[in-house]
Amino acid sequence: MPLEVATPEPQTHRPPIPDRPGDGRRDRSTQRQDIALAVAVRLIAAGPLVVLICIWVVFAILSPYFFTQSNLTNVLVQSSTVALLALGALVVVIAGALDVSLGATVGMCTIVGAVLFRDHPSLEWLVIPAMIGTALAIGAMNSFVIVTLRFGNPFIVTLGMLYVVQSLSAVESGGVQIAGLPDHVLTLANNHLAGVSGPVIVVLVAGAALAFLLNRVAWGRWILAVGGSADAANKVGIPVRKVLFSVYVIASLFAGLTAVLVAGLNDAGATDSGFSILLAIAAVVIGGASLTGGRGSVWKTIVGAVILGSIKNGLTLLSVSPNWTPFAVGAVLVAAVGLEALRENVEGRLRVRQAQIQGEASS
């Protein structure tokens, strides 16, 4: 009887089980890429602060006087007026618009304060309210024309207001500076509290108030929503027109506060040339805000203003011709725009990668 030989069963080779997200077996190179993208986003987001540190290090190496306490205090004081005006411009930019009349508003307010004090010295207590009231009136006029009457593009309307206000300022002042402001205005702009100069305190307090409005108050979040998409904001019940009306008034309020500091620092009222609003908008852009609206940072905008002040101060210490200052500011501005484009690209890649991971996890 033949012996039966058991034939071995054929072995089936199972395909390797693919790594699943979250089980600890993801490809290490992919993990490193994700980490690198996340770190890059954080570094680019901190770009203005990194740029400021680099500028300070370079000027500290080139000039032994730059990094002294007195000079840094001088930089902060010089940057305070640009920072305060930039905060006003930031509110409008976040809402997806632009107000180029803010600089002219500052000049008009300083003249109103100086003329009031010159002609009616006994009403010196009314100087600051008159300056801020003038700014609010100009902002309300912008809002009325742009939002209520719906007259064209905000840029064109505020550009027209810039010329109107500059003309009125020149007529009121006769084209010359009007010297003399009350003591309390000079004290606010030139004295110190606990070793901190008055203008720096004003900027910090105003910045904290604006940050609280934008991040903690519903109205501020509505401003962000309107800047992101006015149509979408309207569909969810946000009063878009009221929000836009308030934006120009808030911006003009900051212009009025800026006028108080400018008048106090110069002890005079004078017509604004229009250059200050360009610096303010540059500070907003360097601070990473999007000119299309919906995004902006209060503290990064302040850092942007300090960057501009540091460039001007450092070049002065190095005895570089003032004609090169606009060149340096323009170079930093272009670099900031390029950095913003890089940030959007990296964030886009990171979002795509996260969507891929979520898709793999759900499959």
Image: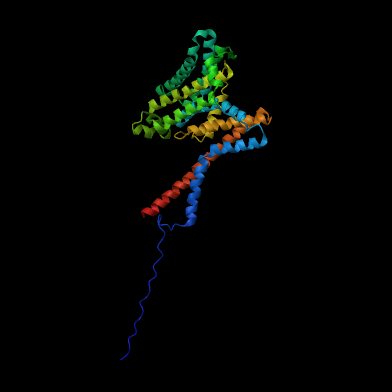
Is residue 160 something that shows in the picture?
Answer: no
In the image, what residue occupies the spot 52% across and 33% down?
A: 285
Which residue is outermost to the front? 194
Q: Is residue 69 visible?
A: yes
Quadrant where the N terminus is found in the figure: bottom left
Q: Is residue 349 left or right of residue 69?
A: left
Q: Position of residue 148 (x, y in %)?
A: 40, 22
Depth check: give the residue in front, 40 or 355. Answer: 40
Which x, y percent locates residue 238? 35, 30
Give the answer, above or below, for where 102 lies relative to 345: above
- Colour setup of the view: rainbow
Comparing 163 with 27, the one in front is: 27
Residue drawn where x is 39% and y is 52% of the image = 359
| Vertical relation: 123 (above or below) 286 | above
Residue found at x 55% / y 30%: 305
Q: Position of residue 213 (x, y in %)?
A: 42, 29
Q: On the image, which quarter does residue 268 sit in?
A: top right
Left or right of 76: which side holds 294? left
| Drawn side of residue 135 relative to residue 72, left or right | left
Front position in the image: 201 or 42:
201
Quarter of the rendering occupied by the C terminus: bottom left
Question: Residue extending furthest left?
Answer: 1
